[in-house]
Image (tube, rainbow, N blue to C red):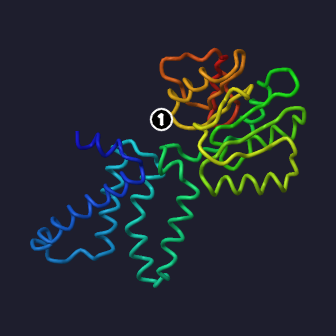
Amino acid sequence: MFLKKIHSLPPVLAAAFIQLVVFGTLSVLLPQLQVHLTFSVPLFWQLVLQGGFAAAISFALGQSYWWVIIQFFGPPLLIIGLIVNVPIWVYPVVLVLLLATFWNVAVNRVPLYLTNDLTAQKIETLLPKRDGLQVIDLGSGLGGTMRQIGKNQPGHFFFGAESAPAPFIVSVILNKVSGAKNVRFLFGSFWKLDLEQFDVVYCFLSPVPMSALFEKAKSEMKPGSLFISNSFQVPGHKPDRTVTVKDGRKTKLLIWKI
């Protein structure tokens, strides 16, 4: 029950709570253990031990691999920063940058997955054969998928929805540089978007939101429109079609016709 409560927390709060629990436990156990040792455990190795235990707990709870890495390296990197006298303002700046980049991991358990070029090319071939389509990438990251397809398909309109500030800003800048006139990026949660206007909805998210997102798509999208998921199934709903991309990871595009 206790572990279920931790798992139900937003990932950033769960990670912080795990670190606090491990810190408190080691603070009690290590002094008692060192009484029976012929040497004391240096602070750096204590923090490595803390990071290791925190990472193991995060892995056991099924947190994203990003969190497992952060949990392991966070405590020892903190002491290294203090040893080399990193200015104190660096820590909040780094934290803000990390949150701005991986906001969806921290809050929604949705990692920053980037669609590769071969998959984008395959998605382009799946677009219905008519002019004026409106296509959106939910959780568009750096926006490469919509820019790549939009460049080749000037007769359609492409959108990306992204709620993590840093990827959104990068996608807007890259879009300005590319000069794409038919590609636009929207900042904010895609849960607040009305999907009725889109003929094709594409996403590369995680297993967590798929059931709710599919229900949203079914209730809002027009009959005959396409819902395409990169890699992640919708529990209880078999796709109408599955396309395998000839890339290194054999990416599967799962396609539902609404």
Q: Is residue 140 above or below residue 101?
A: above
Residue at image point 39% right, 59% down:
72
What's the amino acid at mark 1? Val
Residue 18 in percent (x, y) is at: 31, 55
Q: Nearer the viewer, residue 53 or 113?
A: 113
Q: Residue furthest bottom?
A: 85
For residue 103, side relative to residue 42 (left or right):
right
| Residue 69 left/right relative to 27 | right
Quarter location, residue 195: top right
Q: Nearer the viewer, residue 209 or 207?
A: 209
User: Which element type, helix, strand or loop, lies under badge 1?
Assistant: loop
Is the residue 185 above or below the residue 212 in the image?
Answer: below
| Vertical arrangement, residue 125 with respect to residue 206, above or below | above
Q: Which one is nearer the viewer's eye here, 27 or 150?
A: 150
Give how far across and how far down residue 177 sits, in percent: 84, 56
Quadrant into which the C terminus falls: top right
Q: Residue at x 23, y 38 (%)?
A: 1
What residue is disc 1 on? 208
How many marks are shown on the rendered structure?
1
At 18% from the left edge and 77% from the top edge, which residue is drawn?
39
Which of the 4 image quarters holds residue 194? top right
Q: Nearer the viewer, residue 210 or 46?
A: 210
Q: Residue 153 location in percent, x, y?
A: 87, 34
- Residue 23 screen position, x and y as percent: 26, 64
Q: Residues within 10 Å of mark 1 (few under 14, many from 20)?
A: few
Q: Residue at x 54, y 23 (%)?
A: 215
